[in-house]
Image (cartoon, rainbow, N blue to C red):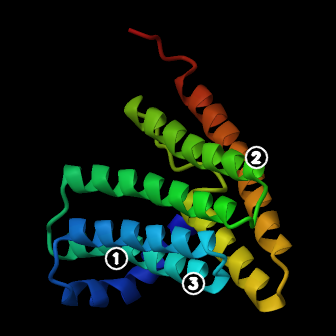
Amino acid sequence: MLNKLRPRIKIYIDPIAEKIHVNPNILTIMGLFMGILSAYMFATGNLLGGGLFILLSGFFDVIDGAVARNHNSHSHFGSILDSTTDRFTDAFVLMGIIYGGFVDSFIGFLAIIASFGVSYVRARMESEGVKGDVGIAERAERLFIIMIGTFLSYALGMNILLEYAIILIVILGFFTVLQRLYYAWNQLKDVKSK
């Protein structure tokens, strides 16, 4: 859902991207590094630091693609690297939240499974020729929910709000997996396997 806003924010992102003369793959790796720092902050109990580094990681995730487009340096490998680092970032952040004691480990592991499931179903759909950007909890939404839960927990001094955010990610993540599976089934039910 939030990914649909990218064309609207493109007018703000493109002027920044035009001024950045760095290989977009380096920006992708910087996003991963920011995600690892976020995980470390959460693991050490620093909610504000964890939230701020998620925000920076998200910025790099948006800007790397914009730089690739604006400098005509988009590559298939860059797309694979971007998707791969997104998965690692998601896992690291959630593991940091678990280790920091902000969420029950079982709920945290369910959130990791849900996040990976959403991405995996999309990849499989697209490998079968079905557009996979269906559902209510894509990566942008999940990171946004974590950021809101983090900043509210920090501002109000109520760590339980971050746990509620992770529970919401679990629910919406598995719901999105079901949405995508149902959509894929509808698109492919009349297609014969080879």
Q: Is residue 168 above or below residue 115?
A: below
Q: Position of residue 16 (x, y in %)?
A: 30, 89
123 left or right of 80 in image:
right
Q: Give the mark nearer the N terminus: 3 vs 2.
A: 3
Disc on res. 106: 2
- SS for tag 1? helix
Q: In 3D space, how far apart are the residues under numbered discs 1 and 3 (Cα atoms)?
A: 21 Å
Name the front one of labels 1 and 2.
Answer: 2
* Rendered location of residue 131, percent (x, y): 46, 42
Give the residue type that dot 2 points to: Phe
**Label 1: which residue?**
63
Identity of the residue drawn at 39% across and 89% down = 12
Q: Nearer the viewer, residue 1 or 161?
A: 161
Which image quarter holds the N terminus?
Answer: bottom right
Q: Which mark is residue 49?
A: 3
Instruction: State which quadrant residue 75 falls in.
Output: bottom left
